[in-house]
């Protein structure tokens, strides 16, 4: 009899939820992770610290209050890295405690160390003292996540040339900063450092950024960031990043050189599979360290599952959790609903972005007709009260069956507000539900009603001309 019914490698969002789901089904479960990484990348270097840092930046800089109190308003003038890390450390500590408690009250054994395969049912856990402990399991879940890509042409030193794992090891808030890669990580940190007053230059090899988002939203984000002195270099590839006595130099393939106090290299991530000895379990990874799975998150070895960032897109905490739960249910024959196709995306730039469903461009490309309804925060009482003049909510509505095809939100609370649209879409509701619903007043949620009325006014015009 194996030691466990399920053994999980990695305690990030995917691993945690796989383990808890299996334990709730009455199974014997173990989780393996480094003692200093319980909670995963999500809690130690990814989602949680970056979102806490963002809150600290917004609070200390007073940025969101300046429309009300004037452009010179600040809660604190000289914001130090210590001011920023204090809040982060507090939240990370609490979150680790919550996770340890959840694992232990579900009788999940937590092994401190790094796991690797010995065979398809056996994992060796290398403990801090260098000893190996062998554990066997009927099912194994690989939830080992990713690490930042670190090309050799970049002279990382963790102090002036950083990746997203060591942003908070900066000695001070840099006066100037280059951010390489305008992906989600790059743009979230570009927003934070720009808000702190750093002069930020973003270098991105593609022609634009965040191309999964609504075009109008990205235009607004660029406008806001330029207003905070962010410069964009699109269509430029970074060849190398050098460290010099007086600062850093980012060298572009076009020959340009950008001097700055610090560089954040955020140009992609690599799956953490190179130390797993996958071949001993009959598995392989692609050149970016990612593992291929089927719709049940099963690898090519059916009793071994893989979930979370290690399987690639969409590489989000929320999806990783759901994949973990689904994998465990599938392993033990528990019915599991297909993951909803309405996956919301939340991007914590300043201002924040969130959307669900399709964009105008995607609908146009697919020849799906749509009508647009927009609500602007400046015309909502709540928008005036909080001083957000620029936020907006956009509904894309089918003129045929009046259902929502996409919801795009930009501004305060966007990542929370999006779930109203997601629920309406998920339940197959129409724009008329939003027109007829009564929303609390004054709220930002009221934007749904305002945008729905805007869309239905346009639909009515269409109908009238059609008649
Ligand atoms: C800066 C940043 C900001 C982010 N912000 C957001 C956000 O706002 N919203 C969002 O949804 N997502 C965000 N993400 C993505 C999110 O953090 C990931 O999608 C999520 O953490 C992936 O979860 P996971 O289950 O794959 O495990 P991870 O969180 O990646 O953790 C993997 C764990 O596996 C462990 N491990 C690795 N190898 C082994 C081994 N051999 N043996 C045992 N354990 C091992 C590691 O130590 C680690 O603890 C962000 C990521 C970054 C980097
Ligand atoms: N709010 C969120 O949900 C959130 C936040 C942060 C991270 N994440 C997750 O983390 C993952 C990793 O994010 P990321 O931003 O590091 O990766 P990414 O792959 O999304 O973006 C990297 C960007 O860097 C560019 N790039 C690559 N090499 C370059 C070079 N040499 N010079 C200039 N530009 C270059 C790429 O074109 C790309 O646009 C994402 O897939 C995302 O899912 C999510």
Image: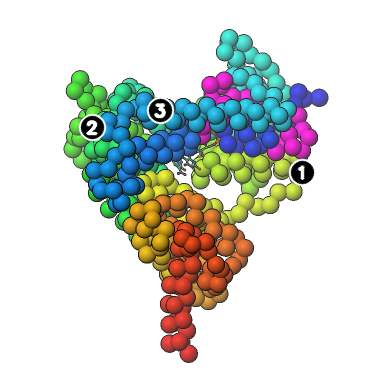
Name the residue at the bottom extreme.
467
- 32 drawn magenta: yes
User: Is 179 situated above or below 450?
Assistant: above
Mark 3 to mark 2: distance in Å? Answer: 18 Å
Nearer to us: label 3 or label 1: 3
Mark 1 to mark 2: distance in Å? Answer: 56 Å
Question: Disc 3 on helix, strand or loop?
Answer: helix
Quarter of the displayed picture in which ligand 2 can be seen: top left
Mark 3 to mark 1: distance in Å? Answer: 44 Å
Residue at left 29%, top 48%? 69
Question: Disc 2 on helix, strand or loop?
Answer: loop
Residue for badge 3: 85
* Left-right relation of 193 to 140: left
Numbered range of the magenta stretch: 21-43
**Label 1, residues with CA under 10 Å away: few <14, some 14-19, many ≥20:** few
- 145 drawn magenta: no
First of labels 3, 2 by sequence position: 3
**Label 3, residues with CA under 10 Å away: few <14, some 14-19, many ≥20:** some
Q: Is residue 158 visible?
A: yes
Q: Which mark is residue 175?
A: 2
Write down the quadrant of residue 373 in the picture: bottom left
* Left-right relation of 337 to 357: right
């Amino acid at each position: 009899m194996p030691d466990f019914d399920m053994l999980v490698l990695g305690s990030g969002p995917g691993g945690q939820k796989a383990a808890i789901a299996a334990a709730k089904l009455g199974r014997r479960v173990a989780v393996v992770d480094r003692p200093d990484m319980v909670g995963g990348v999500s809690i130690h270097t990814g989602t949680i610290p970056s979102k806490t840092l963002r809150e600290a930046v917004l609070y200390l800089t007073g940025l969101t209050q300046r429309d009300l109190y004037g452009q010179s308003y600040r809660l604190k003038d000289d914001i130090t890295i210590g001011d920023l890390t204090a809040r982060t450390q507090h939240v990370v500590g609490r979150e680790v405690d919550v996770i340890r408690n959840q694992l232990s009250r579900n009788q999940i054994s937590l092994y401190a160390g790094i796991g690797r395969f010995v065979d398809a049912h056996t994992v060796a856990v290398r403990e801090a003292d260098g000893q190996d402990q062998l554990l066997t399991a009927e099912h194994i879940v690989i939830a080992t996540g990713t690490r930042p890509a670190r090309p050799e042409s970049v002279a990382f030193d963790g102090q002036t040339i950083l990746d997203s794992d060591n942003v908070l090891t900066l000695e001070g808030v840099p006066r100037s900063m280059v951010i390489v890669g305008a992906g989600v990580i790059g743009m979230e940190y570009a927003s934070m450092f720009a808000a702190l007053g750093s002069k930020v230059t973003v270098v991105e090899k593609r022609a634009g950024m965040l191309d999964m988002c609504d075009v109008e939203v990205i235009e607004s984000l660029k406008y806001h960031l330029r207003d905070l002195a962010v410069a964009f270099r699109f269509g430029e590839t970074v060849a190398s990043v050098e460290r010099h006595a007086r600062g850093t130099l980012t060298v572009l393939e076009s020959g340009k050189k950008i001097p700055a106090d610090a560089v954040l290299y955020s140009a992609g991530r690599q799956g953490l599979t190179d130390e797993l000895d996958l071949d001993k379990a009959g598995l392989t990874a692609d050149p970016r360290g990612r593992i291929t799975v089927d719709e049940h998150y099963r690898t090519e070895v059916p009793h071994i599952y893989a979930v979370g960032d290690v399987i690639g897109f969409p590489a989000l905490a929320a999806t990783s959790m759901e994949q973990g739960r689904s994998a465990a249910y599938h392993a033990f024959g528990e019915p599991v609903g297909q993951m909803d196709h309405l996956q919301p995306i939340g991007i914590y730039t300043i201002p924040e972005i969130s959307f669900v469903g399709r964009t105008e461009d995607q609908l146009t490309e697919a020849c799906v007709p749509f009508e647009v309804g927009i609500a602007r925060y400046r015309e909502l009482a709540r928008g005036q009260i909080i001083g957000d003049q620029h936020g907006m909510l956009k509904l894309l509505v089918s003129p045929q069956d009046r259902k929502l095809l996409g919801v795009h939100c930009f501004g305060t609370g966007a990542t929370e507000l999006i779930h109203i649209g997601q629920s309406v879409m998920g339940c197959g509701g129409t724009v008329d539900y939003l027109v007829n619903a009564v929303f609390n007043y004054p709220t930002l949620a009221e934007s749904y009603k305002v945008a729905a009325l805007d869309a239905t006014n346009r639909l009515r015009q269409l109908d009238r001309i059609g008649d």
